[in-house]
Image: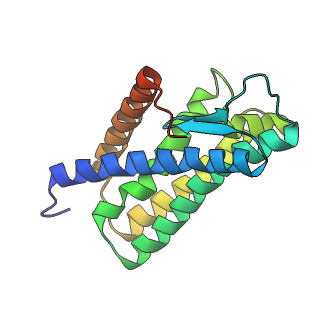
Amino acid sequence: MKGMHWAQYVGVMIIATFFTFFFHEMSHWIAYEWLGYDAGFTLNGASVKDDAITLSKTHRMITSSAGVLFTIVQGIVFFNILKKRQSILLYPFLFLPFVMRVGATWANRFQPNDEGRISLDLGLPLYAVSSVVVVILFLLVFGTSRRNKISMGINLITFLLSIAMILGLVFLDAKFKVRIV
């Protein structure tokens, strides 16, 4: 990444983090609303507004899948964009979905989240769907990194920045719980 401005790259990482989380959670919210529920979302969560409502297994799977599907689509879209435009500044929009879902896989150990709930609802082991999603996103990142000659060092820095950005976003969401809808 000759001539890359690190401040600009970090700025793009911040934008990519908010973009990835916002549209992931918005996708959950759209699914809730489409199914007829009054729902809302923050930067790191979406749910029905009435805690007394229990979703059916099918509705739970649909709403859990919505965010995951958006995140996979984001990865595929930016994988294809990066085939045509080898812009390192677009790379975080591919990399962040991968790290986000790796983090979500790890968080399943505390409480099943999107892929964990889907796995359990399908009668599969907790990490089954998470593993498939992470492998798909990893292959997109690996393929782009290899094709665009993105060094291991840049990938490591991007990984560490991604973790920092995600932890920061999760912290801000937990502290302020600003409802977007």
Number of numbered discs on residues: 0
Which is more toward the observer, 100 or 45?
45
In the picture, measured across the screen, residue 108 lies left or right of residue 24, that is: right
In the picture, measured across the screen, residue 151 lies left or right of residue 59, that is: left
Which is more toward the observer, 9 or 159?
9
Residue 176 in the image, given as x and y percentages of width and height: 42, 24
Residue 99 in the image, given as x and y percentages of width and height: 47, 43
In the rendered image, the vertical position of residue 90 relative to residue 54, given as above or below: below
Residue found farthest to the bottom: 84
Residue drawn at the location 86% of the way across and 43% of the way down: 58
Residue 59 in the image, given as x and y percentages of width and height: 82, 43
Residue 76 in the image, given as x and y percentages of width and height: 54, 65
Which is more toward the observer, 31 or 80?
31
In the rendered image, the vertical position of residue 173 relative to residue 66, given as above or below: above
Splitting the image into 4 quarters, where does residue 84 fall?
bottom left
Which quadrant holds the C terminus?
Answer: top right
In the rendered image, the vertical position of residue 76 relative to residue 124, given as above or below: below
Splitting the image into 4 quarters, where does residue 151 fall?
bottom left
In the picture, measured across the screen, residue 121 lies left or right of residue 86, that is: right
Residue drawn at the location 82% of the way across and 28% of the way down: 54
